[in-house]
Structures are given as C-alpha cells and as structure tokens.
Amino acid sequence: MTTVDLPLTAKDFKSDQEVRWCPGCGDYIVLNTVQAFLPKLGLRPENIVFVSGIGCSSRFPYYLNTYGMHSIHGRAPAIATGLAVSRPDLSVWVVTGDGDALSIGGNHLIHALRRNVNIKILLFNNRIYGLTKGQYSPTSEPGKITKSTPAGSLDTPFNPLSLAIGAEASFVARALDSDKAGLTEVLTAAAKHRGSALIEIYQNCPVFNDGAFDGLKGSDRIIPLRAGEPITFGGLRVVSSGFAGLAVSDAGEPVVHDPSIEDTSYAFALTRLGDQRLSRVPTGIFRQVDRPTYDDEARAQVDRARSGQSPSLQAVLTGKDT
Ligand code: SF4
Ligand code: MG
C-alpha cells in the first residue's frame, strides 16, 4: 500500500494492480463507484480494510490502495469480525459473492449479522458461480440451466435480504451495479451505520449469466425506497395489506417508507415484494435500526474483567465468591 496525503481522491484509492475481470463485467462499475466513494469516509487508506473470500468479486482488495485480505472461501465475515473487535479504529468491509456468502459461507454470514458486528458486507449477486465457470448458485432461479444443472436447477433460491432480516440484521440494502448514485447512497449510509450492514448488489456476469438484470434497467419494475416518502413506482403503489403485510396496488394509500421500524416484519415484507423472476425489485435501504454491536459489547466485557468488576472463573465454576 502506498501512503498518500490528505485530502484524498478516487485516484488515491486505486492500486497499481492490473484489474483482471472479463470485459464488461459489472465488477468494474462497482469498483469505480467504491473508489470514488472512499474519500468521503474521511479516513486515511491505512485505516480502511477490505476482506474478501473466494470468487470473482473477491479479487476486490487487490485493486484498492487500502489494507486488505483475499482470504478463505466463505470465511471473510469471521476474519473481519476478529479485526473489528480488536481494532475499533478501522473501517472494516467484506466483499463476497452469492456462492461465497450464501453457500460456502452461509453460516458465517448469518452469525455476523445476528451479532451485529461493526462490518459492512458487499454481496455481489450475479446468480451464478463465475470464477469456476458457470455453475448454478444459491441465488440462481429455479429451472436455471448451467453446467452443473443441465436439466435445470431444482433448488429454491435464497432471497439474501429476507435471510439477512431473519438473522436480525440491523442494516439491509440493495443496489444495482449500474446505478452509481443509488450504490453511493447506500454505501454512505452503511458507512455511518454502527453495526453490521449488508448491501446486496445485483451484478451482471456477461460471460456466464449475461443480462440477468437487464429487465430492471431504466424500467418501472424498480421500487425505490426513500425514507419518509410514499413507496410508489410506475403508476403503482405499495399499500398495507393487513397484519404487517405489503402489496402492490393501483389504488389505496401508499405506505410511507420507514427503515427504522424495529419490528422485522415490515422490512421482511418489503423484501418479499420482489420475486425470482425479478418482475419487480425494491432498491435502497430496507432496514436501518440501532442496537448494540458485538464488538462494543465484547470490549466492554474485557474492560470489566480487567478492572475486576466481573466474577472470576473460579467463582463462576464453584458458585462462590473468592
Ligand atoms: Fe465477471 Fe463473470 Fe467474468 Fe467473473 S466470470 S469476472 S463475474 S464476467
Ligand atoms: Mg456469483
């Protein structure tokens, strides 16, 4: 990593490594957006860390002039957790894909989210395994024909945002690779959020799953979520449909979006407005609530133990004060 003087620009966050993704890959746009966003953190590059797992998107740390680690398949959240707990002065980010995060690393992802570790997770969802040349992934749609499912996938895919909210994630958002403004907006909010943030990024893989998100470009299938504003799109509106339910309608009072609602039912219902065929997709921040972070609580426990305020291990084992 080269050191640079403040104030910083996007150029200061570009490394000297040759970027090796296929021509036209959506990862390029996301990389450019992240490099343009990083100066807004107001941090020096040496106070920012990107940890990745395995996959095409996991090459990300090579291309940033920050600290970084291209780690173990699916285990980036575990490594990032250790870093966040031991180094509260760092801004810790995870870069992962749909296979890395939801298959090999599914367990690590959900536990990082439920613990509310202060890490920001960018989940590049291209609905395919790209690096290993085109096998179906945990987000591939039913019937998907790939090299590993020549007769069509039989699996029900994950909805990553429903999964995250089921794991009590305190910040959940979605953006498109091609929407620089929308992605920058959620990156900025995620960076300010204290706790785990999951951002799903729909990312085109022109080689093995080309055009998976083409139907969303410039279309009225996008349901934009903006805090404090009625949820409307393409002449339709999102309305309340009974107990914590939401529906799309051409009549009725639109729901005013409030990502700070504590009850997970509302944000969960928002994630269910989309479907596997991507006939409509909400984007923006679904949920953003405050709750204690694992790293703050863990450090407080250590401080209490050091200052003698915690019971000794012997007292716990014997049930007696020593
Ligand atoms: Fe991008 Fe797909 Fe190539 Fe991987 S295989 S670099 S995701 S285009
Ligand atoms: Mg993938």
Image (tube, grey):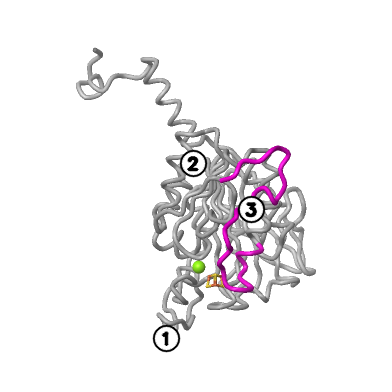
Find disc 3 in the rendering and name its residue: 14
Crowd rating for badge 3 (residues with CA inside 10 Å; few <14, some 14–19, many 20+): some
**Which SS does the magenta portion mostly show?**
loop
Q: Quadrant of the C terminus?
A: top left
Mark 1 element type: loop
Find disc 1 in the rendering and name its residue: 150
Amino acid type at image mark 1: Pro
Q: Say which mark, if any, is on residue 117.
A: 2
Mark 3 element type: loop
Query: Can you tell me whether the CB of the residue at mark 1 lies under 8 Å from the nearest atom of ligand 2?
Result: no
Name the foreground residue: 20 vs 143: 20
Q: CA distance from mark 2 to mark 1?
A: 40 Å
Dot 3 or dot 1: first in sequence order is 3
Q: Which residue is depicted at the point 71% across and 56% down?
A: 225
Do callouts 2 and 1 mark residues in contact (Cβ within 8 Å)?
no
Q: Position of residue 258 (x, y in %)?
A: 68, 48
**2 to the left or right of 73:** right
Q: Is residue 2 magenta?
A: yes
Q: Is residue 153 magenta?
A: no
Crowd rating for badge 2 (residues with CA inside 10 Å; few <14, some 14–19, many 20+): many
| Residue 201 to residue 312: above or below | below
